[in-house]
Amino acid sequence: MIDPVIFSFHIGTFLFALRWYGVLVMTGVGIAAWVATREVARLGENGEAVWDSLIWILPAGIIGARLWYVVNATIGGNQYYLQNPIEIINIPQGGLHIYGGLVFGAITLYFYLRRHKMDMWLFLDAIAPSILLGQGLARPANFINQELYGQPTTLPWGIPIDAAHRISAFSDLLKYPVDTTRFHPTFAYEMVWNFLTFALIMLISRRFAARLKPGSLFFAWLIAAGVGRFLIEFFRPDQPRVGDSWISTTQVVTLVMALGGLLMLAYRYGKLKLPLPPLEENYQIAPKAQPGS
């Protein structure tokens, strides 16, 4: 297996380490931001605003991802963070959840765009598909960390997981020998889904550009991301469940995402009546600053 730490060094009593997880996540963020910049510009707005907003979105996203992970683990019965609250801020230990990052990032983006009088729908439509790409590019980090795997499988693409990284359900090495037991690479399933849906949404954005309305691509992302993660969660025995049910807390969120996206897409095109204010028919482009102003 690949060592998760690329290199490390000490300064006094402090250990500094460069990890593949951080490198791949930031690579995904960078490429996703580059794609989003081009999409914002294609829709007629200043693409550089994506990079400017990242200064605020990234810290907020990391905080949100950590808090969501902690809350999700606690709801699932894990008392670790209640007993050791200082560990909540120990982000290098691991434990981030993408949906917390998306929620906090979206809230931060809203206030940034509001301050600069830019259209939220335009940026959501431009950024949403790039999120799928960024997630997919970061997923190999889960393979390196030996995490986010599923149940044992005999399928040819099953992956080995060493004893130190086994969840309790598969820690019996007599029943699940290290040499012969392979597991579903659920992170890879999500990676493939993300790449395919990214390509599909980008294709739609070009082929049906004249028929698309503000918010359409964002709603499509809600549906695609929600459905994909909902299905993949069935292969994730490590996820907290809702009571004694078969459904995980993440599946509840993704089901709401997918249904919300479907309802809003139908409302957007007049196929469904909802008690909501009408949506704008065109993007609102911020006025360009005049030279010397």
Image (cartoon, rainbow, N blue to C red):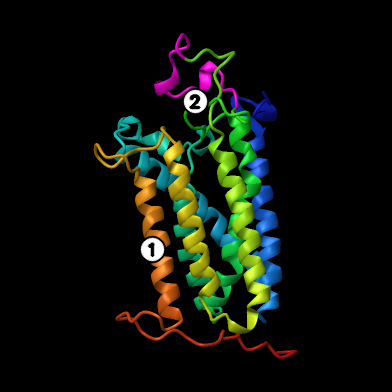
- Residue drawn where x is 63% and y is 25% of the image: 12
Magenta segment includes 163: yes
Q: Which residue, given by chain and number where applicable, does mark 2 sit on?
A: 152
Residue 154, image x and y in percent?
55, 25
| Residue 7 against residue 203 in the figure, above or below | above
Q: Which mark is residue 259?
A: 1
Q: What crowding class fits label 2: few (fewer than 14 Cα within 10 Å), some (14-19), or many (20 or more)?
A: some
Which of the pair 200/61 is nearer the observer?
A: 200
Give me the C-alpha separation between circle 2 and circle 1: 31 Å
Residue 78, image x and y in percent?
32, 32
For label 2, the SS is loop
Judged left or right of residue 73, residue 175 is right
Look at the image and tell me in which quarter the C terminus lies: bottom right
Q: Which residues are magenta?
A: 159-175
| Residue 172 against residue 155 in the figure, above or below | above
For label 1, the SS is helix
Q: Which mark is residue 135?
A: none
Residue 204 appearing in the image: yes
Counting residues from the start of the chain, the first of labels 2 and 1 encountered is 2
- Residue drawn where x is 39% and y is 47% of the image: 250
Residue 125, image x and y in percent?
57, 71
Magenta segment includes 291: no
Q: Amino acid at mark 2?
A: Pro
Q: Residue 13 appears in which quarter of the rendering?
A: top right
- Residue drawn where x is 48% and y is 71% of the image: 111
Residue 63 appearing in the image: no
Residue 148, image x and y in percent?
51, 35
Q: What crowding class fits label 1: few (fewer than 14 Cα within 10 Å), some (14-19), or many (20 or more)?
A: some
Q: Amino acid at mark 1?
A: Leu
